[in-house]
Image (tube, helix red, strand yellow):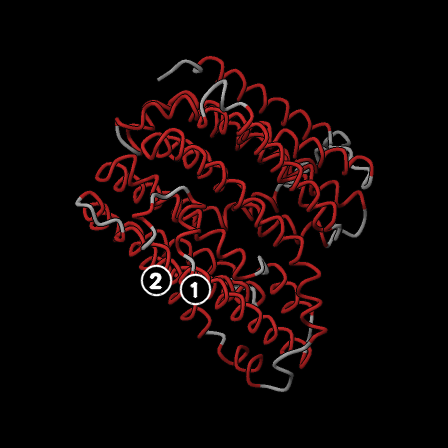
Amino acid sequence: MTAPTVAIGTRTPAAFRSYRPVLRAMSQTGAAALGSGLLSALATKIIAAVGGPEALATLSTLQQLRQAAVVAATGNGQTAVVRGASAFRGAERSGYVRTAACLFAAATALIGGCMISWPQPLAALAGFEPGATRLIPWLAIPVALTSLLVFASALLNALGAIARIAILSVIGSAAMVVGAWPAAHAFAAGERSALVGLLIFSALASGGAALVALFRFRAQVEAWFCGPGQWWSGRAARSFFTMSAALLASGLAASGTLLAVRRHIILTQGLSITGQFDAAWGLSMNQVTLVLSSLQTYYLPAVAKSRSPAERDGHISSVLAIAALAAAGAIAGIAVLKPWLLRMLYSVAFEPAAAYLRWTLLGDYLKVTSWILSIPVLAAGDMKMFLAVDLAAYGVFAAVAIGFAPALTAASSAAIGFVAMYAAHLTLCAIYLRRKLRFVPARGALAAWVIGLTVVTVASALSWDQT
């Protein structure tokens, strides 16, 4: 990056102008992400305080099962729907949207039928005891509602209704808060199905809100579904799977690996320890999600639309610099305050989670960076490389989590595996960008990343033994 030049008058230095679009995007979606995160934290606090670690572990396991099922029920095709509905025109677009709707409906029905017909193997896969088998058929309801939400959100994205999509996440989190107290009390009284009811209530609120949001665009939606065009197109289906196949495999690998690791913790250490691990995992994921969700609506389109390698490299460097500093500040604060945060956001029973959190926080910084470097791979359309990097990273996670367990514990090895996973992912993405895209980060971006890493490392070292 060239040295910043200061112009006479009110013009902003060039080095700072490059960050304006990133900061604008973060401010537009960051507020909704922050609101959703705070509401999610409140719902988790209620579940943890009333139901204890076992309630949180059960809810997290149900959510992980639902996530894996939704990935399969949608073909992880939200991005493919957005791309097709945005790129095509006229009857071709209508045919694509209808074909995608048919694929979503068929896959959702198939997955729902499997959950109703074979609940016992799915419960065993998650590590549930036999008594929890009856929860699985009911879980098919929030899976179907979430599949509807994913499709509706994709259409809203294609229509440019980014603000409404952000509001949907707030509505879902608010519904979790409303239902958390009665669900946790019912769980404490021995009624585990109340937690499935909580997921149904939240998914129903989000799905309903998505349909209401689409009603504003009813003329366009009616044209897509009632105008000229086929209800099924083999060409449209092939186009859908061209993008979604790699994302589907990656999503299933992510959900399946985490489900397997959590199952190992449940079977070897029980639900209480799993709940403590989930507290550390959730606290890490929430703050990372806040940073990344504030950037995702800007970053991928900006990289994909770049007219030259220099413009693309500028977008990557700007996002890298801002995200690194933002993530470092959040991670350092959590590292120093982790005992207090665990008591405030969960309860005293979750204080042992600090031992896992010190590892997952280190992994968070690597995750933010690796995500930034992985998006250009996706923008370049190199889906094979995108999938290969993801599968390699999940393989490292599983190997470390299972391999280190005999010497440590299942929960501790999983936390260490999280760091190893994103170290591997970051390394592979960096190698690809350097060799294939000839990306060299701007000196300011590289300096910001090194400063962020130093801050995170020092904060972690000073607070390592806090419990």
Pick whichever of labels 2 and 1 is earlier in the sequence. 1
Report x, y in % for residue 195. 29, 50
Q: What kind of element bears circle 1?
A: helix
Residue at 57%, 49% in the rendered image: 251
Q: Measured from the top left, where is residue 387 in percent x and y? A: 68, 46
Q: Relative to the observer, which residue lies in front, 363 or 261?
A: 261
Q: Residue flagged by tag 2: what amino acid is it? A: Ala
Does 230 sit left or right of 71 as displayed? right
Other residues around mark 2 within 10 Å, as few (<14) / some (14–19) / many (≥20):
many
Element type where label 2 sits in the image: helix
Disc 1 residue type (three-letter)? Ala
Decide: is 392 above or below 228: above
Q: Quadrant of residue 42?
A: top left
Mark toward the viewer: 2 or 1? 1
Q: Quadrant of the N terminus?
A: top right
Q: Nearer the viewer, residue 217 or 113?
A: 113
| Position in image of residue 421 (x %, y %) | 60, 32
The residue that appears at 70% across and 38% down in the rendered structure is: 14
Residue at the spot 34% in from the left edge and 28% down from the top edge: 341
For the residues labelled 2 and 1, say whether their Cβ atoms are less than 8 Å apart: no
Residue bearing the label numbered 1: 144
Alpha-carbon span between mark 2 and mark 1: 13 Å
Judge whether 413 appears above or below 216 on screen.
Answer: above
Q: On the image, numbered disc 2 is attached to which residue?
A: 205
Q: Nearer the viewer, residue 332 or 263?
A: 263
Q: Is residue 11 visible?
A: no
